Amino acid sequence: MHDESNDELLYTRNKVRLELIPYIEKNINTNVINNINRMSKIVLEEENYLEQLVEEAYEECETAIEDEKLVCNLKKFNKLDIVLRRRLILNFIIKILGNAKDIEKVHIDDIVKLCENNVGGKYLKPNKHIMVSVLRGKIKFEKVI
């Protein structure tokens, strides 16, 4: 569907479509659109595979929701590959909050360190809506009201 805003260069998506891609096609790679489409399919396949691994890791870590808190076995969590741990953390936050708004890589890395250090009674608040704590061999993700 075409509307007048599609031709305005105020929006980054339009600048890419109207200026950047034609420039690349003309000066660098005439097959850029096909290459982008092919790469997008590969990325989607890999994303689907990683999501499958995350679901398996979710079960493996004996993850459960108790009293509106998501609880995970810390020892099993820490044995996972770092890629799965980061994705699980993001997944846990989304399950508790419904989104990951204002959660950045630095927050996820801080939670990974908290879990690796395994010091009971410690917690982080990556944003004002969630608290992540480590206690008695468990990681808890709790919505803050």
Image (tube, grey):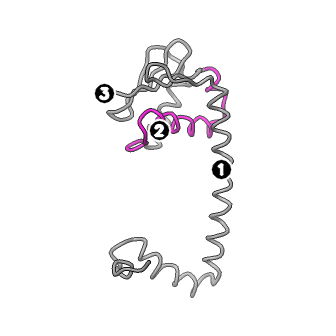
| Residues packed near mark 1 inside 10 Å, few (<14), some (14 to 19) or many (20 plus) | few
- Which residue extends farthest bottom? 26
| Residues packed near mark 3 inside 10 Å, few (<14), some (14 to 19) or many (20 plus) | few
Identify which residue is drawn at 40% across, 71% down.
Answer: 12
Secondary structure type for disc 3: loop
Q: Are marks 1 and 2 in contact (CB under 8 Å)?
A: no
Q: In the rendered view, tell whether residue 23 sits above or below residue 48.
A: below
Task: Look at mark 3 in the image and give the residue it sits on.
Answer: 145
Distance, label 1 to label 2, CA atoms, is 17 Å
Identify which residue is drawn at 63% across, 44% down.
Answer: 51
Identify which residue is drawn at 34% across, 77% down.
Answer: 5
The x and y percentages for residue 129 are: 34, 33
The x and y percentages for residue 52 are: 67, 42
- Which residue extends farthest top? 136
Q: In the rendered view, tell whether residue 104 sits above or below residue 134.
A: below
Distance, label 3 to label 1, CA atoms, is 33 Å
Dot 2 or dot 3: first in sequence order is 2
Question: Please, what is the three-letter code of the amino acid marked with disc 1?
Answer: Asn
Task: Look at mark 2 in the image and give the residue it sits on.
Answer: 94
The x and y percentages for residue 131 are: 39, 27
Which region shows up in magenta?
A: 75-103
Distance, label 2 to label 3, CA atoms, is 16 Å
Q: Is residue 84 rendered magenta in the image?
A: yes
